[in-house]
Image (cartoon, rainbow, N blue to C red):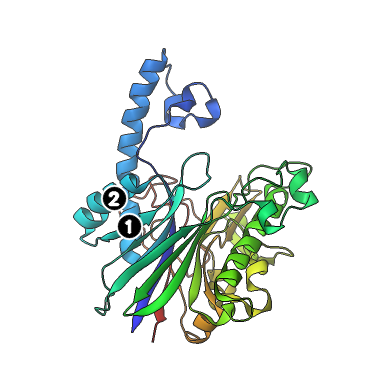
């Protein structure tokens, strides 16, 4: 009996408009910046038209990327709310590609923009085994103080002891697959942000992600018992906004690109994998071929890295020792630089940097659940 499990940051699956760009140029879309807009009313009218047109192109590609995962269960990040998820699933996944997900769950987390983690499930696996929802538990309200995780490093970033740990949530979802229990932990950790206090964005925000990872591990250990948790059947799925390796890119399209694998000294992922608690199964792929995200801030700062994870408990990883995850990159925009031999055929209408399925790539794995 097998289960196809996937995770995907679909990026801003919204069902509302954002008009803040009229007063804040940092939020203004580059298309509207080209035009001399005379009033807020005119801006709102144009922004609505732009958002609707761009969203349709984007969501077609998002749907194709999800369909390509062939997932029975897919964990998602950056979903506005359940109504947005329902509209996307019915209008794009079901009506466009004929692959729908009848079961959909999300809850409000802590993100100031209102983007949450969510899960979609089929009623049964491709093999015909029933997938049944058991319960869903939010951990969005856990504070640093409650878990004893407040540190001087967090205080230096302005995080108070009574503040919530998770920037979105750690959503605990219990299901059964053919009667076999499985627990999923849906996460979306703190983004790296801009440089501050003399540190780059990743280093400056690392204490927050480390606390989030520590909190996830504690939640799992409290649920299953510290001495037995690693042997139980669970997976952590989501965008952790961190990596243990990256592939630095130098050169250009004319003279050729050069790729170098660089190991990082610190990562929040280490908190979860330490002591064999769980395994980052994407690391079963070759080092140069583990990336799910392309980062660039110009030719001097370009790299490929893994931000999207399926971490399997030690027990689940051991019973799936030969399973290697797939990374679906067909929805990437054309600006993404692929190492030699990794090029894929892009989905129709993918643009230079938009439209795109997402800046992230879905990660999927087939698990033996017997």
Instruction: Say whether disc 1 or disc 2 marks the residue closer to the N-terminus.
Output: 2
For image coordinates 53% across by 39% down, the residue present is 112
For image coordinates 37% across by 68% down, the residue present is 134
Can you say whether 342 is above or below 145 in the image?
below
For image coordinates 48% across by 50% down, the residue present is 335
Q: Residues within 10 Å of mark 2 (few under 14, many from 20)?
A: some
User: Quick one: SS at disc 1?
Assistant: strand
Residue furthest to the top? 38
For image coordinates 26% across by 56% down, the residue present is 93
User: Quick one: SS at disc 2?
Assistant: helix
* Quadrant containing the C terminus in the rendered view: bottom left
Taking depth in this image into account, of 219 and 342 the one nearest to the observer is 219
**Residue 319 left/right relative to 86:** right
* Quadrant containing the N terminus in the rendered view: bottom left
Can you say whether 48 is above or below 315 in the image?
above
Q: Is residue 71 visible?
A: no
Q: Position of residue 352 (x, y in %)?
A: 43, 46
Q: Position of residue 209 (x, y in %)?
A: 65, 55
Disc sitting over residue 195 in the figure: none
Disc sitting over residue 104 in the figure: 1
Q: Which residue is mark 2?
A: 86
Taking depth in this image into account, of 259 and 291 the one nearest to the observer is 291
Q: Position of residue 270 (x, y in %)?
A: 67, 68
Disc 1 to disc 2: CB gap under 8 Å: yes
Can you say whether 225 is above or below 97 in the image?
below
């Amino acid at each position: 009996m097998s289960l196809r499990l996937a995770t995907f940051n679909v990026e801003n699956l919204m069902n509302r408009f954002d008009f803040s760009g009229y007063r804040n140029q940092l939020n203004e879309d580059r298309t509207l910046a080209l035009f001399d807009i005379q009033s807020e009313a005119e801006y709102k009218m144009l922004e609505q038209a732009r958002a609707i047109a761009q969203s349709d192109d984007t969501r077609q590609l998002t749907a194709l990327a999800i369909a390509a995962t062939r997932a029975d269960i897919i964990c998602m990040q950056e979903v506005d709310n359940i109504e947005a998820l329902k509209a996307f699933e019915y209008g794009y996944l079901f009506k466009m590609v004929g692959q729908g997900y009848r079961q959909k769950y999300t809850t409000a987390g802590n993100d100031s923009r209102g983007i949450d983690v969510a899960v979609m499930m089929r009623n049964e696996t491709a093999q015909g085994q029933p997938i049944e929802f058991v319960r869903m538990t939010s951990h969005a309200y856990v504070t640093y103080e409650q878990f004893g995780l407040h540190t001087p490093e967090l205080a230096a970033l302005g995080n108070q002891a009574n503040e919530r740990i998770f920037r979105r949530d750690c959503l605990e979802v219990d299901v059964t697959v053919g009667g076999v229990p499985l627990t999923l932990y849906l996460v979306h950790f703190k983004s790296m942000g801009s440089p501050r206090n003399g540190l780059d964005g990743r280093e400056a925000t690392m204490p927050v992600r480390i606390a989030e990872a520590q909190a996830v591990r504690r939640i799992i250990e409290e649920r299953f018992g510290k001495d037995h948790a690693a042997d139980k059947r669970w997976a952590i799925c989501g965008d952790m906004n961190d990596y243990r390796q990256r592939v630095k890119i130098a050169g250009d399209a004319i003279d050729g690109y050069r790729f170098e694998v660089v190991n990082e000294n610190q990562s929040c992922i280490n908190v979860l994998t330490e002591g064999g608690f769980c395994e980052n199964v994407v690391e079963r792929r070759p080092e140069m071929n583990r990336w799910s995200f392309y980062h660039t801030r110009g030719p001097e700062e370009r790299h490929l890295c893994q931000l999207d994870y399926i971490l399997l408990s030690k027990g689940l990883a051991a019973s799936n020792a030969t399973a290697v995850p797939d990374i679906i990159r067909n929805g990437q925009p054309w600006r993404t630089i692929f190492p030699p031999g990794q090029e894929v055929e892009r989905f129709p209408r993918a643009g230079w940097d938009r439209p795109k399925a997402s800046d992230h790539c879905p990660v999927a794995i087939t698990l033996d659940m017997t």
